[in-house]
Image (cartoon, helix red, strand yellow):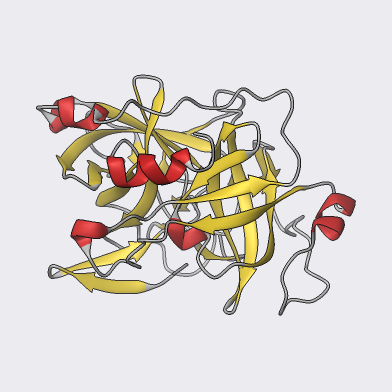
Amino acid sequence: MRARLLTLAAATIVGLGFLAPATASTGGTADGELHPNVAMIAFYDAGGRFRCSATLVSPTVLLTAAHCTDGTLGKTLVTFDSVVAEAPPSPLPVAGDVTAGYTSTELAAAGYLSGTANTHPDYSDFTDINNWNDVGVIVLDEPVEGITPAPLADLGAADAIKQPRKTLFTAVGYGTEVRQAPTGPQKPTPQSYPLIRRYVEMPGQKITHQIIQTNGNDKDIFGTGGTCFGDSGGSLWLDGKVVGVTSYGYTANCRYIDGYQRVDIPVVAEWLAGFGL
């Protein structure tokens, strides 16, 4: 699921991955090198080429969303550049065989890292909110040097939050910037460029045993924005540790509630342990 719309509990949920090059966040701030362990990833599946965000959690493993790994063909491209492109054209290479996806050889030749996508075996593809499990990992072909991996939150960290609305979370990713376009309808809409890493701060809205929801409206007096298309798989931070990954939003213009898959829960932590985490 990359740019798929689906209905759940009478609400429209929009997955925050999307087809490249139709690609930073609603509001927020350019990240620079504040979160150097957050990467942009790109990959092919049967529907074409897509991109998401991911976070280095060990020298060889990146944490992302399951809908950014499920059905991947070939290798996944990885870059930790905070600015990928400020304007078109996209610098991302095209696979020699788009039906087979990227190869590690062609990604290395283009100056990118490569890895293999893995999806949580109990990922429900957004059909069961009680068993969401929207988490995946990219296992790199070679260890990353010079970048400190992000620490994962302790098991049950989010359960200790008794007042979500008084808690500020930070989300980091390479999602679509929402603003008025130079031409066409003069209303805030997701834009294709720039392709840069950003961070936003958001007050919590609700916490369940699988999901953390936040108020992602950039007009919120306690927050600075929210996540949007392309932020999928990016990290949600609490007290300096990763507690979730960007999973979904409720509106197509990224102006409402954002949802994050918790990674501080047993069903996720036990799977991640198999990758040495």
Residue 204 lies, in percent from the top left, at 21, 35
| x 59%, y 40%: residue | 61
Q: Residue at x 42, y 29 (%)?
A: 152
Residue 10, by quadrant, is bottom left
Relative to 92, 266 lies left or right: left
Quadrant of the rendering where the N terminus is positioned: bottom left
Q: x and y percent of residue 213 in the render?
A: 23, 45
Q: From the viewer's side, name the closer residue of 50 and 101.
A: 101
Depth order, front residue of 38/217 = 38
Rendered view: 189 above or below 159 = below
Horizontal relation, residue 223 to residue 9: left or right: right
Question: Which quadrant of the view contains residue 241?
Answer: top left
Give the quarter of the image for residue 27. Answer: top left
Asked whether the viewer can see residue 85, the reply is no
On screen, residue 197 versus residue 97, left or right, reads left
Position above or below: 7 against 18? below
Q: Nearer the viewer, residue 12 or 46?
A: 46
The answer to whether residue 65 is left or right of residue 145 is: left
Residue 52 position in % (x across, y down): 54, 54
Count of labels in the image:
0
- Residue 78: percent from left, percent from top: 68, 47
Residue at image coords 78%, 69%? 95
> Given the current orientation, which residue lies at the most extreme left position?
162
The image shows residue 244, relative to residue 138, as above or below, that is above
Visible in this render: residue 8?
yes
Q: Residue furthest top?
A: 239
